[in-house]
Amino acid sequence: MPVPGLGLLSYRVPGRPAPPKGARVRVPLGSRTVVGCVVEPDAAAPADVTTLRDVVAVLDDEPFLPPSVVDLAVWVGEYYASGPGDPLAMAMPPAARRGEHAAFRTVRVVELADDAPDVSSLRGPRQRAVVERLRAQSGGVAAAALAQEGVGADVIARLVRLGFVRIREDVVERDPFGVATTGQGGWSAAPASDAGRTLTAEQHAALDALQIAADARAFRTTLLHGVTGSGKTEVFLRLAQHVLAAGRRVLVLVPEIALTPSVAGLMRATFGERVAIQHSGLSDGERHDQWHRIRRGDVDVVVGTRSAVFAPIEQIGLIVVDEEHDAAYKQEEAPRYHGRDVAVMRGRMEHALVVLASATPSLESAVNAETGRYDLLRLTRRVLNRPLAEVHVVDMRRELAARGPEATLSAALLEGIAARLERHEQSLVLLNRRGYAPVIFCRECGATVECPHCSVTLTYHRAARRMRCHYCNFSSAVPGKCASCGGAYLERSGIGTERLEADLRAEFPQARIARVDRDTVRRRGAVARVLADVARGEIDILVGTQMIAKGHDFPAVTLAGVVAADVGLGRADFRVGERTFQLLTQVVGRAGRGAIAGEAIVQTLYPDHYSIQAAAAQDYAAFFAREMEFRRAMHYPPDVALINVVVKGRSLATALEDARDLVGRIRGRAAGQVLGPAPAPREKIKDEFRAQFFVKGTRRRAMREAVLAALAARPDLRRRTIVDIDPVSVT
């Protein structure tokens, strides 16, 4: 475990009762020995199996994973066509997957013995001083602390022999609630004043409805659709208090690690130390300790990213999926599950209330609410009746014609930032593309510099003075001449966040500017530190990618600028309109959340595109109607179900040939409409060529079974075929 695509296997347990569901076992698999998890302890042997192999070792006498988590992982493996091994492995700490024992960190503590002799019997002054120190400090003193004070191990050893002191080993949990969570300075997301926590009439109505639903202790899913700044977080915070008071627990999911500082900080400020966090940014030791705290029942609230949906928390009464629309909830590696949808299934299994919260709900969730599958609660006003930001759309075609092709910042945006600096307010500027220049091309022949391993152009990063592929991480120095024609003039074209930051520094040299993207926040705790600086007013202009566009609440930000708002519209993906609308609406919603009204300036080459127009008007209903018209006409989700199948090969011809074979087998089962195969939009990734086809229809199970049956007939293709159920991206 994990073994891609492998189903459940049966083994014998000789000489003892079968271990319980959720226990780990070490079993033979081919020529290897692997760690597995018991799913069905009393299952009968399959009829087609003549000889069962024996379990090598039983690692747990009690369930290591709660049975409910085992059931969830098995469901994920089946629904997403990955097999149960990957999701079961994701549900465990890294060391546990390898069958290792729990590795808790311990510290040696020196304490006074209960029957210690009178200190007067000691001759050495140093020994007497140590004993007196321990008498004054209840609970003992760490041996390391004594060593720093000059107390040697020989002194301690002699006191132990004389019966004055004893040494114990204390477990010390690694605490992730430090810089990595809240940032230096202890930034908390708690509102600055009680005024912001006074519920509006809409919040009261939503909270009352959700409390009634929670009290029913039955599965239910509610979409909480509230405009940016309407106080959705305050609603589910108070709902969490209500659920905890009833003796049940709470699971809160956020789409990205960058959002855990605010949510986890707020939860801990409210519920104290009985809060745990789970995400991939923690060290293995922190993940281990947090996981075991949850498993022991020492916490009431778990906050984490998509993988936290597998947290071993029991007696769940409430699951919150914050920013439920976010594509980051979809895992792009096996198992390719969607954290939001798995959360809904876990709620069903746990008989819990599931709340999906967003200002820009996914079309899937909106349709489920429209058809009555989900309950719907709306928050149409901001707290304290603060107005939504006033949005101005700048046509960059006119700007470029007037100011030249090198203009990256419109006059309106520059004037807006200058005005905020003068008034000591903050600005946020978003460009959803990192690096300095996304394209390097030859001015003589027009050839672009591409990754040798992927069908993408290399992005120039000025700070590193290198070109980098954002898919395989290949990097190279900028060549001195064109590889195609030998020309000596290579042009850096386009703009990324690195160049945007440089341009802003040139325009506003006195401003305090910070950038948040994957290049600047590689170090642990970096995001939290920057956000803490913004919250304390130590940053004037925050530049970044979509990482800064959602979930954050900075009252002093009164201007939100968007550069290249249309950057994603050219992708070969049916969701580009939805993603553009969501991103723009979210970033516009960062402005004016405090006492001062906000403004947003959106720069685009396509000002008339319906997604940009709807985002500027902050009109979800208008966008939903237009986008659903397109989806229904083209038969794309949520109108139908979709499976994206990518077949990899040493050459494009091989990949296409294998894909055609699978397509023929699937069409023979009449499970849905099959489109393709064709070369994938990114034809080559990491030296593997990719062919792609889609299966569309309304019979999800039949479609999935048809794809799996085709792969079963071609087992040689299983390891080089990606099956993505309900994809959020088809590129």
Image: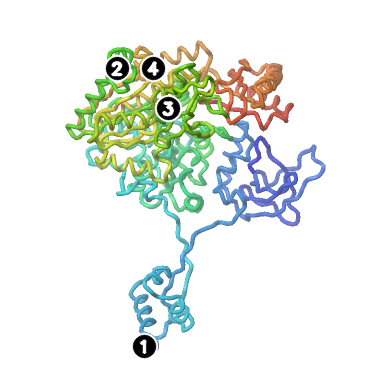
For the residues labelled 3 and 1, say whether their Cβ atoms are less than 8 Å apart.
no
Mark in front: 4 vs 2: 2
Q: Which comes before the other along the chain, label 1 or label 2?
A: 1
Q: Residue at x 50, y 31 (%)?
A: 469
Q: Secondary structure at mark 3?
A: strand
Q: CA distance from mark 4 to mark 2?
A: 15 Å
Q: Which mark is residue 611?
A: 4
Q: Position of residue 574 (x, y in %)?
A: 49, 18
Question: Would you name the residue on which mark 1 appears?
Answer: 120
Q: Amino acid at mark 4?
A: Ser
Image quarter of the N terminus: top right
* Image disc number at residue 394: 2
| Label 4 with label 3: CB-CB less than 8 Å | no
Foreground label between 4 and 3: 4
Q: Can residue 268 be seen in this snapshot?
A: yes
Q: Amino acid at mark 3?
A: Asp
* Residue carrying label 3: 375
Image quadrant assignment for residue 583: top left
Looking at marks 4 and 1 on the same chain, the residue that comes earlier in the sequence is marked by: 1
Marks 4 and 3, how far apart at CA: 26 Å
First in sequence, mark 4 or 3: give its number: 3
Disc 1 and disc 2 in contact, CB within 8 angstroms: no
- Please tell me whether mark 1 sits on a helix, a strand or a loop: helix
The CA span between labels 2 and 3 is 38 Å
Give the mark nearer the N terminus: 3 vs 1: 1
Check disc 2 and give the amino acid type.
Val
